[in-house]
Amino acid sequence: MSNVTVCARFRPLSSKEKRDHGENICIRSLDSETFVLKDEKEEEFTFSFDRVFYEGSEQADVYKFLAFPIVQDACNAINGTIITYGQTGAGKTYSMEGTSILDCHEQNKGLLPRVVDGLFHCLESADNTTKYTVNLSMVEIYMEKIRDLLDLSKDNLQIKEGKVKGIFLSGATEVSISDRTEALRHLSSGIANRAVGETQMNMASSRSHCAYIFTVQQEEKNERRVKMGKLILVDLAGSEKAERSGAEGRVLEEAKTINKSLSALGNVINALTNGSPGKTNHIPYRDSKLTRILQDALGGNSRTALLCCCSPSTSNASESLSSLRFGARHALNVFRFCFSISVC
């Protein structure tokens, strides 16, 4: 079975979309895994994913299917990555954070606060012979520079690799979190710092990748063994076509850098899921800072979940089609990989 799960999620129509284009939508549901999208030229495309979350989907449904298995693995020293991808304004940050990271309303909670809840619920249920330590780092990747969101004075972190730590960010702030409240407080602080940086650097949140890195260390008291699981959640920069957005100057350079890193991520996932069973093929982790950071949370026996967030409006059909093709490409490779194993 593949370690990569690919899902699509459609947010409700926005008030602007309704005002400018009415209730017209570009998708038609077939079932919980398949739908048809009609583009601006009235051409139809059928997509199939591990799960499709339509307009009425609940935040809890997304967490349970997409993230819960990866949270459990992290508590058992298996690395994992959860990624939200899609057009600017398609609902990535809402899926990741909810209406607010500190919003206690159960219905509004995004993946991030639910992951925190899941981690501590898992650790609190563990037997007394195991001691757990959870650490958190938050970084932002903008124009291929890595900035520490827990300490804004660290704005050009370097990626290192060690025998014990694996891939790590040299000098990055890493805080120990002992409960849900403390974790959410640090996350809220980091998210606020991201907003400050947007003002200072004149960039929108969608122009940078944001990574939330949880490290779960477990120590067996009787055997003095230490194991570690890394769980990374990534809110990717919004994909946007330059010819449609009219980007130029610095904004165009931002878009080029974003596209390059997203392409690198796609190539890495392709290489991971499109190889022959039992054979080692080259994985191009070093092609971007994003894929390098994610290296030991994507490869090996790690688990990866990709959520493609889309607008259902006919006005965004071309952008949604682009996002879905990105996800479908990896879903198809997963199918091929699983099929090749089954027939070997």
Image: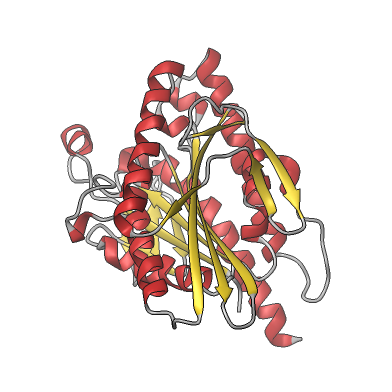
Residue at 32% across, 45% down: 185
Q: Is 118 or 332 nearer to us in this picture?
A: 118
Q: Quadrant of the C terminus?
A: bottom right
Q: Is residue 179 above or below residue 121?
A: above
Relative to 83, 309 lies left or right: left
Q: Is residue 319 above or below residue 133?
A: above
Q: Is 130 or 234 nearer to us in this picture?
A: 130
Q: Is residue 34 visible?
A: no
Residue at 56% across, 27% down: 155
Relative to 60, 137 lies left or right: right
Relative to 275, 2 lies left or right: left
Q: Is residue 242 above or below residue 343?
A: above
Name of the residue lying farthest toward the top? 249
Picture coordinates of residue 175, whole percent (x, y): 47, 47
Residue at 50% across, 72% down: 131
Picture coordinates of residue 145, whole percent (x, y): 61, 29
Q: Is residue 342 visible?
A: yes
Q: Quadrant of the N terminus?
A: bottom right
Picture coordinates of residue 25, whole percent (x, y): 27, 49
Relative to 191, 11 lies left or right: left
Picture coordinates of residue 5, whole percent (x, y): 51, 67
Q: Is 207 or 139 nearer to us in this picture?
A: 139
Question: Which color scheme does this rendered protein use?
Answer: secondary structure
**Snapshot quadrant of residue 41:** top left
Q: Number of labelled discs?
A: 0
